[in-house]
Amino acid sequence: MTRQTERSPQDPPIDGQKPPEPGGISRRGLLTSVSLAGLGAAVGASVPLSSNPTGTMLPSALAQGAPTSGAAAQPSGPQPLDYPGKEKGLVVLGERPLVAETPEHLLDDETTPISKFFIRNNGQIPEPAASPDAWKLTVDGEVNNRLELTLAELKSRFQPKTYRMVLECGGNGRSFFQPQARGNQWTNGGAGCAEWTGIPLSEVLQAAGLKDTAKYTAHYGADPHLSGDTTKESLSRGMPIAKAMEPHSLIVYQMNGEPLPTIHGGPLRLVIPGWPGSLSHKWLTRITIRDREHDGQGMTGTSYRVPNTPMVPGGTADEKDFRILESMPVRSIITAPANGTRLPAGTRAVALRGAAWAGDLTVSRVDVSTDAGQTWTQATLAPTRNRYDWNRWTAAVPLPSDGYYEIWTRATDANGRMQPPVAHNWNPQGYGGNTMHRVAVLVG
Ligand SMILES: Nc1nc2c(c(=O)[nH]1)N[C@H]1C(S)=C(S)[C@@H](COP(=O)(O)O)O[C@H]1N2
Ligand SMILES: [Mo]
């Protein structure tokens, strides 16, 4: 199949515009009547800093043109989300299918509330299930006992587990690739860390009895294809049996203690932590066990795949030389202060908060810099609850004078691999973009 699962033809055209900075300047009441002529045109009452400083090596304030006539000049690019139960601060990256990301400063909670959790669809959003407990899941293929379980049976037959775990879109960080890669232009907001309650997939597969020939899963859900064509899947990915059997791979029916909302795949979804979010199939109806790698929608071509041999950025891909993206790369974000924050004149230090995670790996350290990486300060990592939880981190950095600063963060994973300053290993659909996160602040 050639359809690109991280960008469908129905997506609005990418025009390179970045969302307006929804940051907390005016909300913080620090900047209600101050002129900011020296930094260019203002976006509303915010300091006119790029909401996406990492997209370029230019200083944040110069990284992109800001609208020239204040708050009324809405950029033609992504818009604030207006969706029931969701914060308006989420940013729409695509309307059909609906895709919205969470600006980094809205990921400041220990556990991401449902209202702030990013949304990624490849197809239509199904109607809410009339009676969730009657939802049916079929497990078939290379198994000894084909299972057909209702959600009620699933709950009564197996012991539930609750884990707080990061769910991250495979394309998170894509917007930092140059030239632009195909797909939704995620900054760092295609990720969140929620408490997921469900049944370990391993227990259900054990109950089904895996045959010796069982190699790979294939996932199917109830979301209709965007075109309405019932012979097409919106998405159908799969994983090696070993990943499916990991204790943290769950069939989930609760999010943050609430019944799983429809927009997040309710009543039933997979959560396969550490690997691209596309494995965490929503509105899950069937898992077929295969004797070979899956070839469904999103498994082939350059979808969720990265090149073995480094490509010329923007060049032609040799799809034969691509491998399936498995564990996601290490990433850290600054969740406070928000990009574009203005601090009172004379402020001489700023407390930072953030989060870091590393796919299947743990995070070994997080460092922050206020001088474009010339010097670094090590952040303090809070403990995680399990290997797929994120590390919250804190740090304090001095601000020697008034003026403009960029704060950079970089995390290093347990294998010693650190986030790069620029997106590395360009590929047509922009996977693995894990550049250091940068926020700009203005003192005085
Ligand atoms: N059935 C179905 N499941 C799906 C998708 C989809 O389009 N259809 N999108 C996947 C992708 S690409 C991601 S990143 C996650 C996003 O989950 P969320 O919308 O709950 O944040 O769901 C995955 N599960
Ligand atoms: Mo995704």
Image (cartoon, rainbow, N blue to C red):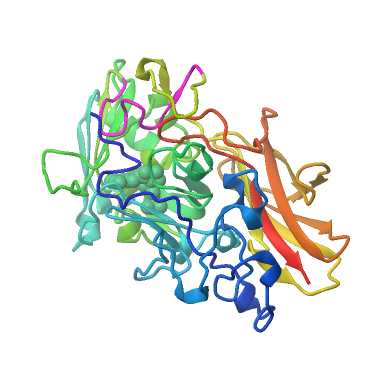
- Label the magenta part by its dominant secondary structure: loop
Q: Which residues are magenta?
A: 293-309
The verdict on residue 431 being magenta is no
Q: Position of residue 285 (x, y in %)?
A: 23, 44
Residue 140, image quadrant: top left
Whether residue 270 is visible here, answered yes or no, is: no
Along the line of sight, which residue is nearer the eye, 64 or 356?
64
Whether residue 35 is visible here, answered yes or no, is: yes
Q: Position of residue 28 (x, y in %)?
A: 65, 77
Residue 75, image quadrant: bottom left
Q: Residue at position x 69%, y 49% from top?
A: 383
Residue 252, placed above or below residue 146 = below
Along the line of sight, which residue is nearer the eye, 14 or 230?
14
Question: Where, quadrant-wise, is the C terminus in this rendering?
Answer: bottom right
Q: Residue furthest right?
A: 400
Residue 235, placed above or below residue 99 = above
Q: Is residue 135 left or right of residue 193?
A: left
Q: Residue at position x 61%, y 77% from top?
A: 26
Q: Residue at position x 65%, y 35% from top?
A: 420
Q: Is residue 51 left or right of residue 299?
A: right
Residue 427, placed above or below residue 76 = above
View quadrant of ligand 2: top left
